[in-house]
Amino acid sequence: GTDAVRSRFLRPLWVGEEVWCQLFSEPGAGSDLAALATRAVRDGEDWVVDGQKVWTSSAHTARWAILIARTDPDAPKHRGITYFVCDMTDPGVEVRPLRQITGEAEFNEVFLTGVRIPDAHRLGEVGDGWRVAQTTLMNERVSIGGARIPREGGMIGKVAATWRERPELRTHELHRRLLDHWVEAEVARLAGERLRQQLVAGRPGPEGSAMKLAFARLNQAISGLEVELLGDEGLLYGEWEMRRPELVDFTGRDAGYRYLRSKGNSIEGGTSEVLLNIVAERVLGLPPEPRNDKDVAWKDLAR
């Protein structure tokens, strides 16, 4: 962005004065994000945006959003996208809750109807939004999979605390599995610290996809172990009321919540299947999957 954009937005974002959200995924463009259909059409010094976004965390509390939209339907899908800053208070922005399996709605669908964005709020060059978006996604995956936590923090800490406080629940097999997961969680924590150092240095890479994969798998395995450890008690979940949390909470209120919430970990921030492809191609250097639409204009793609 320009110096003016950086001056206006970075400090309030950094100190938490203004909440932001990410308007990327769409009903027809999730795993294949570059197929997005939200349009931005130039009108003088503004862009007029129409479309729909989905699975947007914190859109109900956000003041601003980062938005990718299609500005050139005649270009191949990866090359006709532009990156913008969107004012979430614009009258053309409508936010609706998406209720989750936990009962709450931290995600949203967002409808954009005639939203006007000044060209001054464009980040990067017209048509270069996919490159900018890739940097955003790499940062997101590091922040999810490599979040800063202390030793025995996060999900593994909840199970370890239950193990210590409830000796009547213990078995040799559960003890073995708890130790296995504890070691895995510690390895993931240390690997996450290394990735955060890359992030601070301004070098987020595809390795973040591997960390996000590990995070999802571990959370689901550990929360499942906690439910087993608690037996019938772990199957109870009595707080299925509609809530609109201001922050994303992975570890939550109780074992039942953690078990249910962890199911989304392998979808949000990039599905595990897509991330496996990223690791295979960009980390391990394996051949990419065949793509027949690479040089086809977006408008000519089957949808």
Image (tube, rainbow, N blue to C red):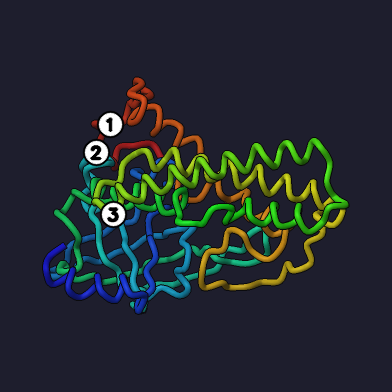
Asked if the residue under mark 3 is in contact with the one under mark 2, i.e. CB atoms within 8 Å, the reply is no
Read off the residue under disc 3.
200
Establish if 19 lies above or below 225.
below
Rendered residue at 36%/51% (across/down): 196
Rendered residue at 24%/51% (across/down): 202
How many dots with numbers? 3
C-alpha distance separating marks 2 and 3? 33 Å
Frontmost of labels 2 and 3 is: 3
- Amino acid type at mark 2: Pro
In depth, the one of 116 and 86 nearer the eye is: 86
- Amino acid type at mark 1: Lys
Establish if 46 lies above or below 160.
below
In depth, the one of 133 and 158 nearer the eye is: 158
| Residue at the limit of the structure toward the top, as seen here | 287
- Percent of width and height locating residue 89: 36, 79
Mark 2 Cα within 10 Å, few/some/many (few <14, many 20+)? many
- Seen in the image, is 58 located left or right of residue 12? right
Establish if 287 lies above or below 65.
above
Read off the residue under disc 2.
76
C-alpha distance separating marks 2 and 1? 7 Å
- Seen in the image, is 164 located left or right of residue 193? right
- Amino acid type at mark 3: Val
Mark 3 lies on a secondary structure that is: helix
- Seen in the image, is 201 located left or right of residue 253? left
Asked if the residue under mark 1 is in contact with the one under mark 2, i.e. CB atoms within 8 Å, the reply is yes
Asked if the residue under mark 3 is in contact with the one under mark 1, i.e. CB atoms within 8 Å, the reply is no
Mark 3 Cα within 10 Å, few/some/many (few <14, many 20+)? few
Along the polypeptide, which appears first: circle 2 or circle 1?
2
Read off the residue under disc 1.
294
Frontmost of labels 1 and 3 is: 3
